Image (cartoon, rainbow, N blue to C red):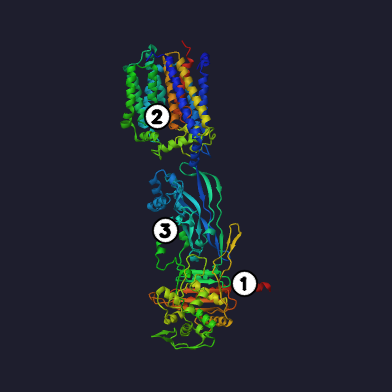
């Protein structure tokens, strides 16, 4: 592969180092989260590092090809991802009551994770011309994007993987907002938005999902189940106090008081061990990272790049915010990983693909 | 809405980022700074459990240091309500694994409901190894259940000395409410009977505390610190287990009691009551069936017949009369009464046990051959109140003060007593019965041992004392029990000599009622008794008594043996005393000989 020196020069090193800092914190935190007081299994760390290495290769490949080329072919990626999402429903592995993983040649992955950046590219490809013309989207304009969004959404929620589904829908809506909507379109979307909770509660949500919402509203509604875990998560974060209990010293997760503490509840581990100071540093790194991602969207060479950059930024922002809010009991429990910090190969790869797209767009910002 | 430019969208985005950061920081400030200490406390409570480390109870030794009661490790199953995830899963699972009733488990949890949910509730004690293995293997499925290794009371001699040692058992709700047990908690073991109860304060150790870290399933992950328990103090008894075993063996399958006392100190050498119970059964949490079997047993195995059984003393009581009559000069060595086998009084005839009669008998032969007619006369001459007075000064009909709970007083009647109780005057005919230890005389075997001591020790008795000393776990002697004098009566030399000679004759003279139990090397003095039982339901057998002391000079032991429905004192009870004396002095002779051999 011939490396264009000019492009290398234009690489967004701020974004890279900020991302590396987050990933570094993630690995360090994962070492603590996956070990007990006596022994640690490095299996998790090794798998995470392998996923990271794979992700770096993907980033190189992605940045090599022009994002326009990638976006124009995104339909095929979409169909490919959709194929796997359907496949999961048929032959997926069951873990924790949900069918989310698929195993091919001994490597298991979660196709829904990859749907997120692909979705962004598909929508960007669909809408960038409207954006260029600066025509607000009418109701008719958004039907196609909505259909393309809801097909994978429904399939993913059926697994069930509500978290990823929610991220996909919210990201799509964010993209539509970014492209620009007519007032009438806003009105319709908002009315749909107001209706959704009722429809979801009465027809769509599974009992355990309802229980999560109930125990979010009242933490004592289910003291043995979700409420208990939410409480333990709060205790973990709160007990970190100003400076934290120290690396490898978090008792809440090490003694199994918090479920999924290496994936969805990873922030409780960090909050407990590094306290307020550490958390502020982590949040600042995230906010700065997201801000930098937005800058990529702002500086993009064209509307297509801008939409893609904004879309993947939305993914990262939404995952970060919802994940942390959930850990500190400001949002109901839903399975969303903390980008670059949570354990999970598919999630990490998906995030790295997003970053790859961002780098791709940022290096080509002076291109004519 | 005005025309939206791309940059205005980014302004919105920045605003959202600022809001997000603000919300997160406020929440973190609230959680980690404002409520940080509270949350830290909660997390400590989560992981740290204070567990009681049960102190081993003090050991009980006999006089030569043999262990009569100690502790051994046992596996006990607990449930910590706080750690239960699914109530029926844990309770049903455990009930199945342990083969206990589900309702029993629930009852136990209910009983401890006023304790905090982190308080472990004992479900089953002393489970066998295979159940330990079962529970360990299924732990994951029964969260909240745990096994603790704890000391358990162990009585190596089983049923022997059971009534003296007593037993320990789990404290019950009523006891917990009393002031006496205010610093106890549910699940604690307390002495409920015998020495275990009487010396609870000495035997009980100081429980330690262990702070352990537990995980979310309640499993101990590591011990943070430990305050070691302090073992209870040891009791060193006056009991001689060699003699005790001799007695227990000779009373096997009999009902009754036997006690032997050192007349010089009051130290109790032997205390046996039959039928007995196995105190080990109580220590491991007695099952309902076992408890029913013991509590409802018509032979009352839980009664300590030596201190709680009241029986007519029969002819043994004659000793008291002889002492008083001689002392007052109502009779002397040569005073004789004619025994024709019966004694007409009022409109009835009181019989002597010997149908043909004893002829003219003086006090010596009256004691040796236990002539009833002689003592009918003596009794009448004394009158009931002087009999009562004598009995009282010996300590008959009064508590001896032995260091066991629940001693019974017994009764020696007096005119005043009858007036008070029945509102009727005393009739002389009743005195006739009392003279031979029948009628309204009810005494415990330990009181009759005091009578034997009284004679042996020339009018002095000591309070019977089981425990000699209390020793701390480090070996420091904390308390030595002083000999407490119960009675000290000055008696004429002749009086004592006559009675002692009589008692010596009972065993050692041909015609003596216990001649069959004489010993080669020791002169044992004694008195048989045969107490008629009120109802002759048990095959018509009377209670057999024998009181004794030995040797005749410088007595070292005073004995009472009672065999319920044993028939005659001479045949049923005297052999037990013989066995004790024989054994005691054989050993003593052997030691003497060994010493003599060494000196040579």
Q: To which quarter of the image does residue B586 belong?
A: bottom right
Position in image of residue A245 (x %, y %): 53, 35
A130 to the left or right of B28:
left
Marks 1 and 3 share the same chain: yes
Task: Identify which residue, A366 or A265, lies in the foreground.
Answer: A265
Asked if badge 2 and badge 3 are on a common chain, one would say no
Task: Give coordinates of residue B337: x percent, y percent.
Answer: 48, 88
Q: Residue at x 51, y 77 (%)?
A: B390
Residue A328, x across and y down, in percent: 45, 32
Per the model, the C-alpha gap separating discs 1 and 2 is 91 Å
Earlier sequence position, callout 1 versus callout 3: 3
| Residue found at the far right of this picture | B600
Q: Does B189 sit above or below residue A21?
A: below
Label 1 environment density (alpha carbons within 10 Å; few <14, some 14–19, many ≥20):
few
Q: Is residue A93 above or below residue B543?
A: above
Residue drawn at 46 percent across, 46 percent down: B118
Q: Chain letter of disc 1?
A: B
Callout 3: helix, strand or loop? loop
User: Is the residue under label 3 in contact with that under label 1 (CB below 8 Å)?
Assistant: no
Q: Alpha carbon of mark 1 to alpha carbon of mark 3: how far?
A: 46 Å
SS label for mark 1? helix
Q: Is residue B449 left or right of residue A106?
A: right
Mark 2, Cα crowd under 10 Å, few <14 / some 14-19 / many 20+, is some
Instruction: Residue B168: give x, y in percent of width and height.
Output: 48, 59
**Chain to which the residue tagged by mark 3 belongs:** B
The residue pinned by badge 3 equals B287
Secondary structure of residue under mark 2: helix
Q: Which residue is mark 2?
A: A163
Q: Nearer the viewer, mark 1 or mark 3?
A: 3
Q: Label 2 is found on which chain of the structure?
A: A
């Amino acid at each position: 592969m011939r490396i264009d020196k000019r492009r290398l020069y234009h690489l967004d090193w701020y974004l890279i180092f900020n991302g590396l800092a987050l990933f570094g914190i993630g690995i360090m935190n994962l070492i603590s989260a996956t070990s007990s007081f006596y022994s640690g299994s490095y299996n998790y760390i090794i798998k995470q590092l392998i996923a990271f290495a794979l992700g770096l290769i993907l980033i190189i490949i992605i940045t090599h090809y022009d994002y326009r080329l990638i976006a124009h072919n995104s339909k095929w990626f979409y169909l490919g991802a959709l194929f796997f999402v359907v496949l999961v429903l048929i032959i997926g592995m069951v873990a924790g009551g949900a069918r989310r993983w698929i195993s091919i040649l001994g490597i298991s992955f979660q196709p829904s994770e990859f749907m997120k950046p692909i979705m962004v590219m598909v929508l960007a490809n669909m809408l960038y011309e409207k954006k260029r013309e600066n025509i607000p989207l009418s109701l008719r304009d958004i039907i196609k994007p909505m259909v393309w969004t809801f097909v994978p959404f429904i399939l993913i929620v059926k697994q069930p993987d509500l978290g990823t589904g929610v991220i996909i829908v919210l990201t799509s809506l964010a993209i539509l907002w970014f492209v620009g909507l007519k007032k009438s379109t806003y009105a319709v979307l908002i009315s749909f938005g107001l209706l959704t909770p009722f429809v979801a509660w009465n027809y769509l949500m599974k009992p355990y999902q309802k229980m999560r919402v109930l125990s979010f509203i009242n933490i004592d509604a289910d003291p043995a189940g979700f409420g208990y875990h939410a409480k333990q998560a709060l205790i973990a974060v709160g007990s970190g106090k100003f400076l934290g209990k120290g690396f490898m010293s978090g008792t809440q997760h090490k003694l199994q008081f918090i479920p999924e503490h290496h994936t969805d509840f990873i922030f409780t581990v960090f909050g407990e061990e590094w306290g307020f100071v550490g958390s502020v540093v982590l949040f600042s790194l995230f906010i700065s990272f997201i801000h930098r991602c937005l800058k990529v969207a702002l500086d993009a060479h064209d509307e297509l790049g801008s939409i893609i950059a904004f879309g993947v930024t939305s993914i990262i922002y939404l995952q970060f915010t919802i994940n942390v809010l959930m850990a500190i009991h400001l949002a109901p429990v839903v399975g969303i990983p903390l980008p670059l910090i949570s354990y999970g190969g598919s999630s990490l790869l998906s995030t790295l693909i997003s970053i790859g797209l961002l780098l791709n767009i940022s290096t080509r910002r002076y291109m004519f | 809405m005005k025309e939206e430019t791309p940059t205005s969208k980014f302004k919105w985005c920045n605003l959202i980022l600022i809001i997000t950061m603000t919300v997160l920081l406020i929440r973190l400030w609230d959680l980690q700074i404002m409520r940080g200490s509270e949350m830290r406390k909660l997390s400590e409570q989560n992981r740290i459990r204070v567990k009681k480390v049960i102190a081993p109870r003090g050991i009980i030794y006999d006089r030569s240091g043999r262990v009569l009661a100690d502790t051994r490790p046992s596996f006990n199953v607990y449930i910590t309500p706080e750690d239960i995830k699914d109530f029926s899963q844990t309770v049903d699972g455990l009930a199945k694994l342990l083969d206990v009733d589900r309702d029993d488990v629930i009852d136990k949890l209910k009983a401890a409901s006023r304790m905090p949910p982190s308080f472990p509730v004992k479900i089953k004690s002393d489970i066998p190894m295979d159940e330990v293995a079962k529970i360990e293997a299924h732990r994951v499925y029964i969260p909240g259940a745990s096994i603790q290794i704890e000391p358990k009371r162990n009585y190596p001699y089983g049923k022997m000395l059971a009534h003296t040692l007593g037993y320990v058992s789990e404290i019950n709700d009523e006891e917990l409410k009393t002031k006496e047990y205010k610093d106890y908690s549910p699940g604690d073991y307390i002495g409920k009977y015998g020495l275990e109860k009487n010396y609870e304060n000495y035997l009980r150790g100081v429980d330690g505390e262990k702070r352990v870290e537990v995980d979310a399933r309640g499993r101990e992950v590591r011990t943070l610190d430990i305050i070691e328990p302090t073992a209870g103090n040891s009791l060193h008894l006056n009991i001689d287990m060699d003699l005790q075993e001799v007695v227990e063996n000779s009373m096997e399958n009999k009902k009754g009691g036997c006690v032997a006392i050192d007349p010089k100190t009051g130290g109790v050498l032997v205390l046996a009551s039959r039928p007995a119970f196995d105190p080990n059964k109580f220590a491991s949490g007695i099952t309902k069936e076992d408890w029913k079997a013991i509590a409802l047993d018509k032979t009352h195995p839980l009664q300590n017949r030596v201190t709680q059984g009241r029986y007519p003393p029969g002819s043994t009581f004659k000793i008291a009369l002889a002492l008083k009559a001689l002392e007052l000069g109502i009779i002397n060595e040569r005073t004789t009464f004619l025994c024709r086998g019966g004694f007409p009084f009022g409109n009835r005839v009181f019989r002597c046990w010997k149908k043909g009669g004893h002829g003219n008998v003086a006090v010596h032969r009256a004691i040796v051959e236990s002539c009833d007619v002689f003592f009918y006369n003596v009794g009448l001459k004394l009158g009931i109140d002087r009999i009562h007075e004598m009995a009282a000064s010996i300590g008959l009909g009064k508590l001896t003060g032995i260091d066991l709970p629940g001693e019974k007083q017994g009764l020696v009647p007096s005119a005043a007593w009858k007036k008070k109780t029945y509102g009727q005057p005393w009739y002389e005919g009743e005195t006739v019965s009392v003279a031979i230890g029948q009628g309204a005389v009810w005494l415990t075997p330990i009181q009759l041992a005091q009578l034997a001591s009284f004679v042996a020790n020339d009018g002095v008795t000591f309070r019977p004392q089981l425990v000699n000393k209390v020793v701390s776990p480090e070996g420091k002697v904390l308390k030595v029990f002083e000999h407490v004098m119960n009675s000290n009566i000055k008696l004429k030399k002749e009086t004592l000599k006559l009675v002692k000679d009589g008692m010596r004759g009972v065993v050692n003279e041909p015609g003596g009622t216990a001649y069959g139990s004489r010993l080669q090397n020791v002169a044992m003095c004694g008195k048989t008794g045969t107490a008629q039982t009120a109802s002759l339901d048990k095959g018509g057998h009377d209670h057999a008594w024998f009181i004794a002391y030995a040797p005749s000079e410088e007595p070292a032991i005073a004995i009472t043996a009672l065999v319920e429905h044993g028939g005659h004192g001479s045949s049923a009870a005297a052999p037990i005393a013989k066995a004790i004396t024989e054994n005691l002095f054989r050993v003593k002779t052997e030691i003497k000989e060994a010493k003599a051999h060494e000196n040579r």
